[in-house]
Image (cartoon, helix red, strand yellow):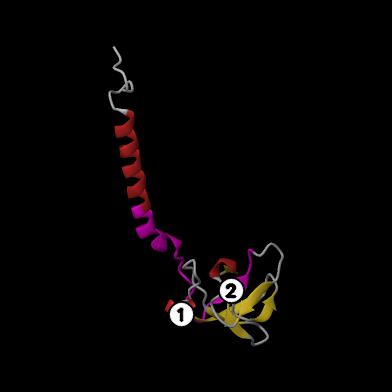
Amino acid sequence: MRRAGRDFDGASPTRRIVAMSLVAALAMVLLSVAWPALAQVEGPPARSVVMVSNTDGQRLNLRAGPAADQPVVAKLSPGEVLTVTGPGGAAGVNRDGAPVPGVVAPDGGEGRTIVSYFRR
């Protein structure tokens, strides 16, 4: 027989809500701790050669620094070959934690662009 105010498994609705809230809070804490590690992508080593790709045919901005608000120093076409001058490092990581290493373009222009647009 079912008691008033109880679900079939015997837990009260209030107890079930509290339990679900605790599980959600724990998941948020675990995600906030693990997210930076999950978001980081290993950048290519210095002196490696990479090709501009994954741009859907659009030209890629080569910027003066690692942030999107840095001035554009060149526009790179898909397939252009770049030489990596240094790893992303602490000074070369964007706000999402992705490495933005220094590169040299074929015309000698130097700047930074995000590794998700590289193919080795």
Disc 1 marks a residue whose amino acid type is Ala
Q: Residue at x 45, y 68 (%)?
A: 42
The x, y position of residue 87, in whole percent, is 47, 78
53 in the magenta segment:
yes
Mark 1 lies on residue: 91
Q: Which residues are magenta?
A: 29-54
Q: Image check: 46 left or right of 60?
A: left
Mark 2 lies on residue: 68
Question: For residue 59, what is the image quadrant?
Answer: bottom right
Q: Residue at x 64, y 88 (%)?
A: 108
Q: Residue at x 38, y 58 (%)?
A: 32
- Give the number of the mark in front: 1 or 2: 2
Give the Cα separation between the discs numbered 1 and 2.
14 Å
The x, y position of residue 17, in whole percent, is 34, 36
Disc 2 marks a residue whose amino acid type is Ala
Q: Residues within 10 Å of mark 1 (few under 14, many from 20)?
A: few
